[in-house]
Amino acid sequence: MSSDVLTEEELRAVWQRVQRSREAKRRGRFVTLVLVSAVAGALAVFFLWPRPTPEVRQQGGLAFVRVGSGETVRLSDGSEVRAGAGAELEVLESSAARVSLHLQRGGARFSVAKGTGRQWRVEAGELSVEVVGTVFSVAREAVGTRVEVEEGVVVVRGARVPDGVRRLGAGESLVVGGAVFEAPVVAAPSAAPPPQQQQPRAAQTPVVVAAPVAAPVAAPAQAAAPPSAAELMVRADVARRTGDLDAALTLLDRVVTEWPGGPEAPLAAFTRANLLADAGRHDDARAWYRRALELGLREPLAASARSALEAGAER
Amino acid sequence: MALNVVAASPLNRLAVFPDEGGPADAELVARALAGDAWADGAIYRRHARRLSNLAARLLGSRAEAEDVLHDVFVDVLQDLTSLRDPSALEAWLKQRTVRRVQRRFRRRTFWRFFGRETTEDLSLALLASAACPPDLKAELTQLESAIAALPSRQRIAWVLHVVDGESLPDAAAACGVSLATIKRDIAAAQRALETAQEVR
């Protein structure tokens, strides 16, 4: 005969507790499962829910990416594409070695990660921009296609690009005209070189414009819609090329006056200053160099403007 | 007085449990794994009394023994799939019970740090079988405080082997330690109890 610690009643009570605990555990497991499923579902919805932008659609085996104004698409290699309003990009090729995009409409800023070895090409109308590691913008506008380089170097190819190919460095831009323009011509407004700078003026060329010599220069009022800043810039360069300095100065002044906050304004002021300096109107030129700097002229053009101001002060 | 409890090893069992009839443990485990709720209850009925007495002898507390019994069965009935040899159910249950008792001792140490002592309300002498000679019960009563003062590992090993009559390999398996370790623990406990007995 043994003396047991727990009586039969107590053992039965423990068994009932055991069963209650097991039931509670089962319920707990079920609740946990439901909660985990709910969280997993929420995460799946969050990550898989189609974003309103960028819109990706398939058409004829090609992927189209349509992004809204100011939207940024980040790629796996760290590169970024920020599109302007209504921009539409077609992905022609995407591999570890190469990314090829077709800008069908609108404008976009491309920040290409350096050191990835991935070659980028952006096709925009007649232009083809090739790059490895840089920051640049491409925009299809009424007057043509504009390429602006913020960092690094790009190579622009196209039938209307002077000599078919043009290398653009930081701070340089290129506008290739639309259908109204016939033959590519390089027009390079130049700055009066400061005494301490010996490099040729072509090296400082801020804007390369491919436009016809015979294009109308000062007839913006005839257009149904007022000309854009880019269009005025093109006309100004054409006017300067044809020797119509006053028209060029007027058009550049209009860019600064009508679009003081636009990206063309500092460039227009800088170009106007260069033209005035070339014409020997140094006081006016200094005033416009200062204006260009006030408008936020980017390097290296800003350094050039400062040098011109210092040179003028010494004189 | 001769120290029968301490000197004689292993001693007689203090509690004797009759073997119940019915299906073998292996069959009960198989049926429980197949979802037979009756088999769960059968396993409990067969082993609960034995395990509660073991926990009580190790812990010296009725309430804690009841809690350990509850915890062990909640665990094992959920974890039956991890039992590799169903016929070794009893040894497995004992091992799980000892593990739960060890956890209880750790909890006691924790609460002692904050000044809360656990009162042991059961004595080994009271738990001894009716057939246990009165002189042996007297010896156990005298040893109570010395046993309670042993480190928990030595106490469990000594009670399993000397009081519960487990063989050294079975005690080692129940404690989850090697044979050498269980021998060392039992020897250390034995020396401590002999010293306490001599002082008295």
Image (cartoon, coloured by chain):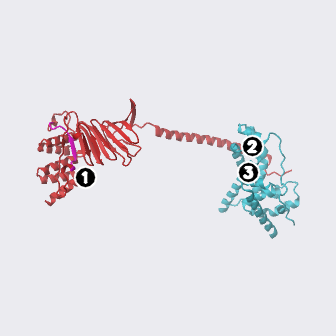
- Position of residue B107 relative to residue A60, above or below, is below
Magenta region, residue range:
A203-214
Q: How many discs mark residues in the rendered view?
A: 3
| Three-letter code for the amino acid on which mark 1 is drawn | Pro
Q: Mark 3–mark 1 contact, CB under 8 Å?
A: no
- Would residue B61 be found to the left or right of residue A118 on screen? right
Q: Secondary structure under badge 3?
A: helix
Chain holding disc 3: B
Residue A165 position within the rendered picture, expressed as x and y whole percent measured from the top left: 25, 41
Q: In this rendered view, identify the residue nearer to me: A294 or B26.
A: B26
Q: Secondary structure under badge 1?
A: loop
| Residue assigned mark 2 | B86
Q: Are marks 3 and 2 on the same chain?
A: yes
Residue A130 position within the rendered picture, expressed as x and y whole percent measured from the top left: 31, 42
| Residue assigned mark 3 | B95
**Is residue B120 at all visible to an observer of this figure?**
no
Q: Are marks 1 and 2 on the same chain?
A: no
| Three-letter code for the amino acid on which mark 3 is drawn | Gln
**Is residue B126 at all visible to an observer of this figure?**
yes
Residue B109 position within the rendered picture, expressed as x and y whole percent measured from the top left: 68, 60
Q: Which residue lies furthest to the top in this view?
A: A60
Position of the C terminus of chain A by quadrant: bottom left
Chain ID for red: A
Residue A179 position within the rendered picture, expressed as x and y whole percent measured from the top left: 22, 33
Q: Chain B is drawn in which colour?
A: cyan
Q: In this rendered view, identify the residue nearer to me: A100 or B31.
A: A100
Image point 77% across, 50% down: which residue? B52
Q: Secondary structure under badge 2?
A: helix
